[in-house]
Amino acid sequence: NNRAEYTALVMALEKATELGADEVKVYMDSELIVKQMTGRYKIKDAELAKFAVRAHNLIQGFKKLTFQHIPRSMNAEADALVNEAIDERML
């Protein structure tokens, strides 16, 4: 779900801001969001555009920020950890 991916991105950027980071590397398995955030794809969905604006505003606070797409097939462990955290939060 792209909304969930954007929510995670915004939360991560907020946490990095809170921790005082000045350089951030974002690794995501959502190729769509990586390409949208790097300007290679336009954001057509109005709801996703709101998340993208929030993310872009947060990005302005960093000296350097890079995005890298990680294919889901190479991201099984991280995906399992995220699902576990979501399940715990739902309880």
Image (cartoon, rainbow, N blue to C red):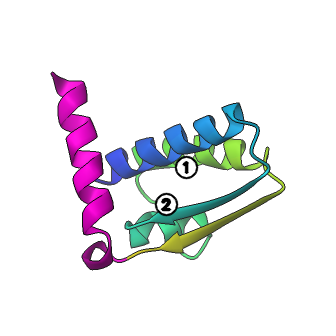
Circle 2: element type = loop
Q: Quadrant of residue 30?
A: bottom left
88 to 57, vertically: above or below: above
Name the spot of residue 79 as percent of width and height, x first.
Answer: 27, 58
Q: Quadrant of residue 16?
A: top right
- Does residue 70 show up magenta in the picture? no
Tell me which residue sits at (29%, 72%) in the image. Answer: 72
Tell me which residue sits at (17%, 35%) in the image. Answer: 87
- What is the span of residues highlighted in magenta in the rendered image? 71-91
Q: Verify CB contact (< 8 Å) between mark 2 and mark 1.
A: yes
Amino acid residing under circle 2: Ile
Whether residue 46 is visible here, answered yes or no, is: no
Residue 52 is tagged as: 1
Name the spot of residue 71 as percent of width and height, x first.
Answer: 35, 77
84 to 30, vertically: above or below: above
- Does residue 82 show up magenta in the picture? yes
Write down the residue under mark 2: 43
Front disc: 2 or 1: 1
Name the side, left or right, on which 43 lies relative to 73: right
Name the spot of residue 88 as percent of width and height, x first.
Answer: 21, 30
